[in-house]
Amino acid sequence: MSVSRQIKWRGKSLMQKVDVLIAENLKTAGQVLKDDIKGTLNVRGADFSQPGEPPRTRSKRLLKSIRAKVDRSGGGLRLIVGSNAPHWHLLEFGTVNMEARPYLRPAFDRFRGQAERIVGKGFAVRLT
């Protein structure tokens, strides 16, 4: 007596589900990172920030400009988080007349481990 099994591979369907899950997780990760950056920037004060500190909020223009989006161009998925304020780079990197007041890079550094956990959520593999 012979036993036969047929296995049908639905790779394309599986990859579509994986793509959707990763995109959702990236969106969640982007929101968490965006909230962290905004929390860092939402410090009011009459004094200017010191070199190396995140900029203090004066007009809220920078605070309101923080964006996060999932980009699908180039055949893959990537998370883009940043600002579209015209002066974001002057604060982040400094100028010849002002030392940097970084707020993006420190947030990315704090967030790295958490991002890996968020993006990997739902991908538990069980080998038995």
Image (tube, rainbow, N blue to C red):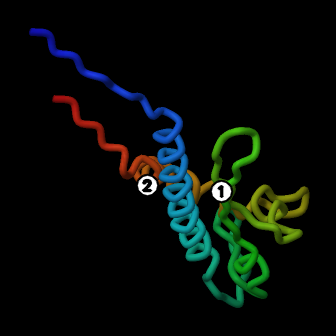
**Which percent across, then down, holds residue 127?**
21, 30
Q: Amino acid at mark 2?
A: Ile
Between 98 and 63, the one nearer to me in the picture: 63
Q: Is residue 35 left or right of residue 86?
A: left
**Which percent across, then down, holds residue 2?**
14, 10
Q: Residue at x 70, y 78 (%)?
A: 63
Q: Splitting the image into 4 quarters, where does residue 33 fall?
A: bottom right
Q: Kindly identify which residue carries mark 1.
A: 70
Instruction: Find the distance from the CA under tag 2 to the CA under tag 1.
Output: 14 Å
User: Dot 2 lies on which element?
Assistant: helix
Q: Residues within 10 Å of mark 2 (few under 14, many from 20)?
A: some
Specify which label sits upstream in the sequence, 2 or 1. Answer: 1
| Number of marks in the rendered image | 2
- Residue 118's disc number: 2
Q: Splitting the image into 4 quarters, where does residue 40 fall?
A: bottom right
Between 92 and 114, the one nearer to me in the picture: 114
Q: Residue at x 66, y 88 (%)?
A: 45
